[in-house]
Structures are given as structure tokens and as C-alpha cells.
Image: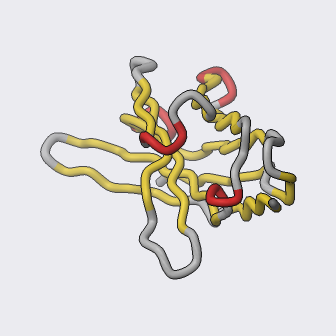
Amino acid sequence: QVQLVESGGGLVQAGGSLRLTCAASGSTFSINHMGWYRQAPGKRRELVASISSTGSTNYADSVKGRFTISEDNAKNTVYLQMNSLKPEDTAVYYCNAVVVAGLLQHAYWGQGTQVTVSS
């Protein structure tokens, strides 16, 4: 079992910055990769950024050059630094961790943190 707790969301003006934090606990040694997703009202949940256990990163086109995902393995924590925020970044942001065991994989989710960007 893996537990994820997000923090760092809030209200910010367009052009501003926020840093989201996701603290993982439990069987963190089994995590293969982690990521951040977001879901805006009336829209599907979408991948924002991910980072593998080797440090390889992946970003949605809409956030490339503005958002940076990073991790502190010693603290079992993943961060999402969000710069140059736009109103369209407004959403609930969820931390995700994927555990892979052979051919099976299981995804864990945090409770979500609201990010609101005002114009």
C-alpha cells in the first residue's frame, strides 16, 4: 500500500507560480513512477507530468517549458513547480504513484489539491 498526500495548491494570479508537493508513505520502495494529473470541471483527468524511478521525465505539451517535476528520494516526495500559470491551468491536481509487480500494475492517488489561476 502507498499513501499520497498533496499540498501547495491555492489561488494565484495569471503569470504567478505555485509549487505542489506530494509526500508518499507506505511501500514506497515498490513505486515504479510517479506523476501529477489534473482535472478541470467538466473535463477528463489528464496527465500533466511524470517522473520515473530513474529520473526520466515526461510533460504534457500544454505545460512544457512552464512546469517542472522533480523528486527527493530521501524524503519520498515529488514536486511540481508551476511557473507562468494561466487561467486554463485551473483544476484539481492529483498525485499519482504506480506500482509494478511483474505483469501487474496498480495506481495510487492522492486526495487532490485545488489550483485556481485568476485572469
Place of residue 99 in the rendered image (x, y in percent of width and height, measured from the top left): 35, 45
Place of residue 23 in the rendered image (x, y in percent of width and height, measured from the top left): 67, 43
Place of residue 18 in the rendered image (x, y in percent of width and height, measured from the top left): 79, 42
Q: Nearer the viewer, residue 93 or 101?
A: 93
How many tags in the picture? 0
- Identify the residue at image location x=57%, y=70%: 40
Image colouring = secondary structure
**Quadrant of image for the C terminus:** bottom right
Residue 11 against residue 73 in the figure, above or below: below
Residue 112 against residue 84 in the figure, above or below: below
- Identify the residue at image location x=16%, y=40%: 102
- Identify the residue at image location x=47%, y=54%: 1
Q: Nearer the viewer, residue 94 or 81?
A: 81
* Residue 115: quadrant of the picture: bottom right
Q: Nearer the viewer, residue 1 or 14?
A: 14
Q: Nearer the viewer, residue 75 or 114?
A: 114
Residue furthest bottom as drawn: 42
Residue 77 against residue 101 in the figure, above or below: above
* Residue 15: quadrant of the picture: top right
- Identify the residue at image location x=47%, y=74%: 43
In this picture, residue 113 sits left or right of residue 110: right
Place of residue 33 in the rendered image (x, y in percent of width and height, measured from the top left): 40, 36
Residue furthest left as drawn: 103
